[in-house]
């Protein structure tokens, strides 16, 4: 087992020092061969159906995010092995007070349409993504910027955005200013010690002028400034080719990457074994049994600890669950996480009692107390005390990835046996449909969820998922809303030292244990396999394939 990558954030110092700081801990370099590959050629990797068109600010899931990460123009790049932040398009990001930031861009970087990447392309993109009327999934990432609240629409009686009846005061954030073609400034409402670390996430990507002239046309042919550009996309694949005019530091070796969309993990796995697909980041649960996958893919497999978590939400649209904390806790207590980890995942997941990944600095084990500890008798007693659940308790999952069927059925069977509830696992055809059902409020009962960190920070496992501002367009699918939690997040972001910030984030996490909007399950290892056609395979600290390292044989 390789050591986990730990990101050490230098809060309370200038941004220049922060971006120069190294990260401690072990790397994640599971499958790198001895530089035996060659430059050029093409590869194919497993993909899935994006929820939305490939617009950076409106993509908050991995199916689209993995493609955008190869195409987008961002200020910061995260090291593949450690997740340490490094300057990418940014020449520098400087601040003396962690509230007023000056960003200077490297000159000569171009978008795929040949236009220059300028400061206004970041400012315009950020304002567009933040504006409530545009309904972008990444809007809430801009909440710290001064004037963000003025770009948000008012809400109706049910807390949903009402941009027609209660339009926003402004379409732009007052905290963003263009100084010249290569310089812009950012002012946050409070001190945000880890603000520069966040800026490598794709929601902070620049957009070309052509996007604002015709956003719909951009959806058909997305344009970035990254090492790869989009050649074509369809319902079955997304094809990227190396951008000839890319002048950044993260040049790929391969000329072409095809993301093939699969609706069945067994099909993608079989194609890797047969040499018809070059890489998959999903190994079917039945292939984990007895390490069959390692026999099928000798010396071409890896199981890597990465910044990913799995949990399930309690539907905020379920009247039986939404106001009954004891009922929610009893259901969680009735789940034997250790048994599922052993029988379904063959030990490639680690049961967890936290809402935060063990891979990030600030992790404090055991934030989830008795509700995350399997206790059949105590669970049944609390369940009965809470009034039980009437009717069928559904556990909804997307059936196209990740062994979700097996674990959802295991959870449902345990709830049936341990609580006497009529529990049923309910599949949804694919991830895109699943997400749309969640956002439309169509799901009751329980539904699965997971998180692949966007940037290496304890904050990333709390704010984008549980802050009240991360609903409705963000990832707060449980509609969690606790002012005390939000206040702690703000205090933590403004803390002068990393230790003080982490202590406040830990306090915020403890409130999740009290309110219990979701139930943590396990930290996932990223299990991958590759064909004999490729070498120099490296899985990043985020659980993704490093497209700059992989080579063809």
Image (spheres, helix red, strand yellow):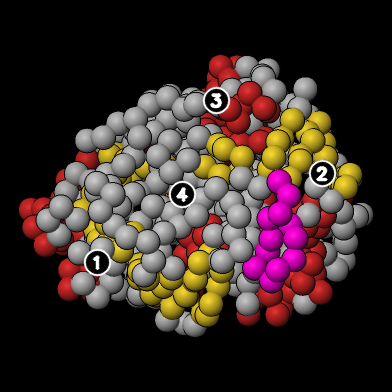
* Residue 92, above or below 525: above
Horizontal side of residue 130 vs 71, given as left or right: right
What's the distance in space between the residues labelled 2 and 1, CA to CA? 44 Å
Q: CB atoms at circles 1 and 4 under 8 Å apart?
A: no
Q: Secondary structure at mark 2?
A: strand
On residue 21, the disc is 3
Horizontal side of residue 288 vs 446, given as left or right: left
User: Can you see residue 315?
Assistant: no
Q: CB atoms at circles 2 and 1 under 8 Å apart?
A: no
What's the distance in space between the residues labelled 3 and 4, CA to CA? 26 Å
Query: Which residue position is annotated with label 2?
Result: 183
Which residue is drawn at the image coordinates 66% and 36% (left, top)? 196
Pick whichever of labels 2 and 1 is earlier in the sequence: 2
Residue range corresponding to the magenta coloring: 106-117
Query: Which residue position is annotated with label 1?
Result: 533
Query: Which residue position is annotated with label 4?
Result: 451
Q: CB atoms at circles 3 and 2 under 8 Å apart?
A: no
* Residue 360, above or below 442: above
């Amino acid at each position: 087992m390789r050591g986990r990558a730990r990101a050490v954030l230098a809060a309370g110092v200038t941004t220049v020092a922060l971006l120069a700081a190294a990260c401690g801990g072990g790397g994640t370099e599971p499958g790198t061969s001895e530089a035996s590959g060659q430059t050029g050629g093409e590869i194919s990797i497993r993909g899935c159906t994006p929820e939305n068109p490939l617009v950076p600010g409106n993509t908050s899931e991995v199916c689209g995010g993995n493609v955008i990460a190869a195409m987008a123009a961002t200020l910061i790049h995260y090291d593949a092995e450690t997740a340490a932040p490094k300057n990418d398009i940014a020449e520098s990001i400087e601040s003396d007070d962690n509230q007023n930031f000056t960003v200077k861009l490297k000159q000569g970087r171009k978008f795929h349409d040949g236009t220059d990447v300028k400061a206004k392309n970041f400012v315009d993109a950020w304002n567009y993504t933040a504006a409530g009327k545009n309904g972008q999934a990444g809007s809430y990432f801009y909440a710290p910027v001064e004037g963000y609240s003025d770009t948000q629409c008012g809400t109706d009686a049910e807390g949903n955005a009402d941009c027609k009846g209660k339009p926003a005061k402004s379409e732009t954030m007052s905290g963003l200013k263009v100084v010249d073609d290569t310089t812009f400034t950012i002012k946050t409402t409070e001190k945000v010690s880890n603000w520069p670390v966040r800026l490598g996430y794709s929601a902070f990507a620049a957009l070309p002028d052509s996007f604002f002239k015709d956003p719909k046309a951009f959806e058909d042919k997305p344009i970035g400034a990254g090492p790869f550009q989009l050649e074509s996309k369809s319902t079955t694949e997304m094809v990227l080719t190396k951008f000839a005019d890319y002048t950044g530091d993260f040049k790929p070796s391969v000329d072409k990457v095809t993301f093939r969309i699969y609706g069945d993990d067994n099909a993608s796995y079989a194609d890797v074994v047969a040499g018809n697909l070059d890489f998959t980041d999903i190994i079917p649960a039945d292939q984990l049994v007895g390490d069959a996958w390692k026999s099928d893919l000798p010396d071409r497999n890896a199981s890597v600890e990465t910044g990913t978590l799995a949990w399930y939400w309690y539907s905020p649209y379920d009247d039986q669950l939404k106001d009954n904390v004891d009922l929610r806790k009893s259901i969680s207590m009735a789940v034997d996480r250790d048994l599922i980890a052993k029988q379904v995942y063959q030990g490639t997941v680690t049961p967890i009692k936290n809402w935060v990944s063990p891979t990030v600095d600030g992790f404090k084990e055991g934030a989830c107390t008795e509700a995350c500890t399997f206790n059949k008798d105590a669970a049944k007693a609390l369940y009965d005390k809470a009034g039980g659940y009437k009717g069928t308790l559904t556990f909804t999952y997307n059936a196209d990835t990740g062994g979700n069927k097996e674990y959802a059925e295991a959870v449902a069977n345990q709830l049936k046996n341990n609580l006497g509830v009529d529990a049923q696992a309910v599949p949804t055809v694919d991830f895109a449909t699943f997400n749309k059902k969640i956002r439309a409020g169509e799901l009751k009962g329980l539904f699965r969820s997971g998180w692949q960190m966007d940037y290496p920070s304890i904050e990333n496992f709390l704010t984008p998922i549980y802050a009240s501002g991360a609903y409705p367009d963000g990832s707060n699918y449980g509609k969690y809303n606790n002012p005390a939690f939000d206040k702690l997040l703000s205090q933590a972001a403004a803390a002068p030292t990393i230790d003080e910030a982490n202590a406040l984030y830990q306090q915020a996490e403890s409130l999740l244990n009290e309110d219990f909007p979701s139930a943590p399950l396990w930290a996932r290892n990223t299990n991958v396999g590759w064909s004999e056609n490729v070498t120099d395979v490296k899985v990043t600290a985020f659980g993704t394939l490093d497209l700059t390292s992989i080579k063809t044989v």
